C-alpha cells in the first residue's frame, strides 16, 4: 500500500474504533469498548506507517 492509502485506512479505522468505543461505553459493553480501543490503535499504527513511507519517499 502507498502512503496515502495507509493514511486513509488509518483514519477510517480510528473513526470506527472511536464509534465502537462510544457505543460500548453507552451500552456498558466492555467487549465492544476493548474492540474499539484495538481498532483505534490499529488506525494510529496505519497512519504512522503512512507517515514513515512518506518520509522515505521524500528522501529518495
Image (spheres, rainbow, N blue to C red):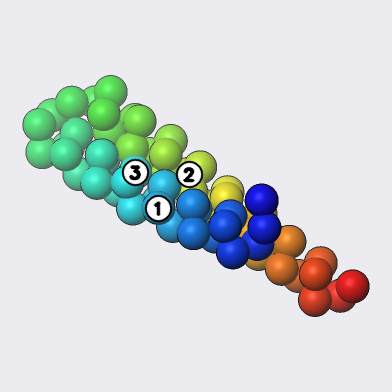
Seen at 32% across and 46% down, the residue is: 16
Residue 39 visible in rendering: yes
C-alpha span from label 1 to label 3: 8 Å
Circle nearer the N terminus (2, 1):
1
Between 21 and 53, the one nearer to me in the picture? 53
Circle nearer the N terminus (1, 3):
1
- Under circle 1, the secondary element is helix
Circle nearer the N terminus (2, 3):
3
Q: Which mark is residue 12?
A: 1
Rendered image quadrant of residue 17: top left
Q: Are marks 2 and 3 in contact (CB under 8 Å)?
A: yes
Between marks 1 and 3 in the image, the one whose residue lies nearer the viewer: 1
Q: Which residue is mark 3?
A: 17
Q: Position of residue 55 (x, y in %)?
A: 76, 70
Residue 25 located left or right of residue 41: left
- Under circle 3, the secondary element is helix
Q: Position of residue 46 (x, y in %)?
A: 57, 50
Seen at 26% across and 40% down, the residue is: 21
Between 25 and 11, the one nearer to me in the picture? 11
Residue 48 located left or right of residue 24: right
Seen at 40% across and 53% down, the residue is: 12
Q: Position of residue 29 (x, y in %)?
A: 18, 26
Rendered image quadrant of residue 54: bottom right
Between 15 and 2, the one nearer to me in the picture? 2
Residue 48 visible in rendering: no
Q: Which mark is residue 41?
A: 2
Picture layout, residue 18 above or below residue 2: above
Amino acid at each position: 500500500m502507498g502512503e496515502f492509502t495507509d493514511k486513509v485506512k488509518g483514519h477510517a479505522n480510528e473513526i470506527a474504533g472511536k464509534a465502537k468505543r462510544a457505543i460500548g461505553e453507552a451500552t456498558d459493553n466492555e467487549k465492544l469498548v476493548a474492540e474499539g480501543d484495538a481498532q483505534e490503535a490499529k488506525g494510529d499504527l496505519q497512519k504512522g506507517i503512512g507517515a514513515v513511507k512518506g518520509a522515505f519517499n521524500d528522501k529518495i
